Amino acid sequence: DQQVKQNSPSLSVQEGRISILNCDYTNSMFDYFLWYKKYPAEGPTFLISISSIKDKNEDGRFTVFLNKSAKHLSLHIVPSQPGDSAVYFCAASANSGGSNYKLTFGKGTLLTVNP
Amino acid sequence: GAGVSQSPSNKVTEKGKDVELRCDPISGHTALYWYRQRLGQGLEFLIYFQGNSAPDKSGLPSDRFSAERTGESVSTLTIQRTQQEDSAVYLCASKPGRYGYTFGSGTRLTVV
């Protein structure tokens, strides 16, 4: 049972345009959401997060939107740059207030930004 | 070091052999996690250590898998009698508090 779903295995966009990566979840206990970026042969690196008490969090070119009623979040990258080409993982936690911070990950979306 | 260090970076082993993977967390990080990523899949939680508390082993897929960590130092993940389905990238992460995992680069395990 996949609790975090990234239904698009890949996405290709032109440099300068917006990239929108989507993520759906099924566990209503999830209250904290994160996006990680992964380059080949490297570990995932934290990108941006959002708590369930918010519906938007912005950090530079990256914005995460959360729609709790739809159990859906999205990552917007604008403008997209070739260096953004990577696999993006959506992750969720059901215990943001506690010390046991186990993350459930989606399968990832490969973003390719074409020059 | 500045980051989470994992060794070896690549390991090819024969089916049925035991393997040991090592993780050196960032100094001072109290929590340490092991995840694995099989081909085409997301990251699967395996085990979590927090200081001297009993580890959360709820993600270990079978009793062939075990992990140890002494205090807030190095952790080893051991897979006994490896099977082909154990082939994956094994990722270690550490964090100082509630948020902010830092992942290592992983160990790519191939069981032939």
Image: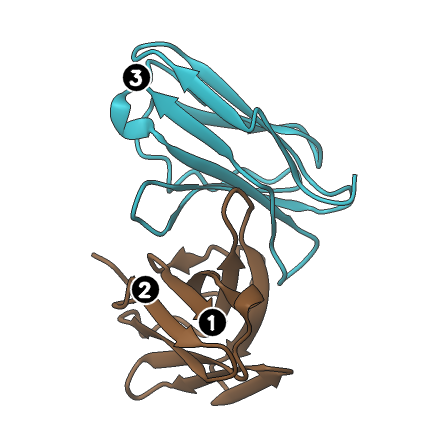
Chain colours: A brown, B cyan
| Above or below A63: residue B106 | above
- Real-space Cα distance between discs 1 and 3? 37 Å
Is residue A93 found left or right of B100 in the rendered image? left
Q: Are marks 1 and 3 in contact (CB under 8 Å)?
A: no
Q: Quadrant of residue A60?
A: bottom right
Q: Are marks 2 and 3 in contact (CB under 8 Å)?
A: no
Q: Do the residues labelled 1 and 2 touch (CB within 8 Å)?
A: no
Whether discs 1 and 3 lie on one chain: the answer is no
Q: Quadrant of residue B7?
A: top right
- Residue A2 % position (x, y): 24, 59
For image coordinates 30% across by 66% down, the residue present is A6
Q: Which mark is residue B112?
A: 3
Q: What residue type is labelled 1?
A: Phe
| Above or below A30: residue B25 | above
* Mark 3 nearby-residue class (10 Å; few <14, some 14–19, many ≥20): few
Q: Which residue corresponds to mark 1?
A: A33
Q: Is residue A54 in view from this perspective?
A: no
Q: Is mark 1 on a helix, strand or loop?
A: strand
- Residue B6 % position (x, y): 61, 32
Q: Which residue corresponds to mark 2?
A: A10
Q: Which amino acid does label 2 sit on?
A: Ser
Q: Is residue B66 in view from this perspective?
A: yes
Q: Which chain carries label 3?
A: B
Q: Which amino acid does label 3 sit on?
A: Val
Q: Is mark 3 on a helix, strand or loop?
A: loop
- Real-space Cα distance between discs 2 and 3? 29 Å
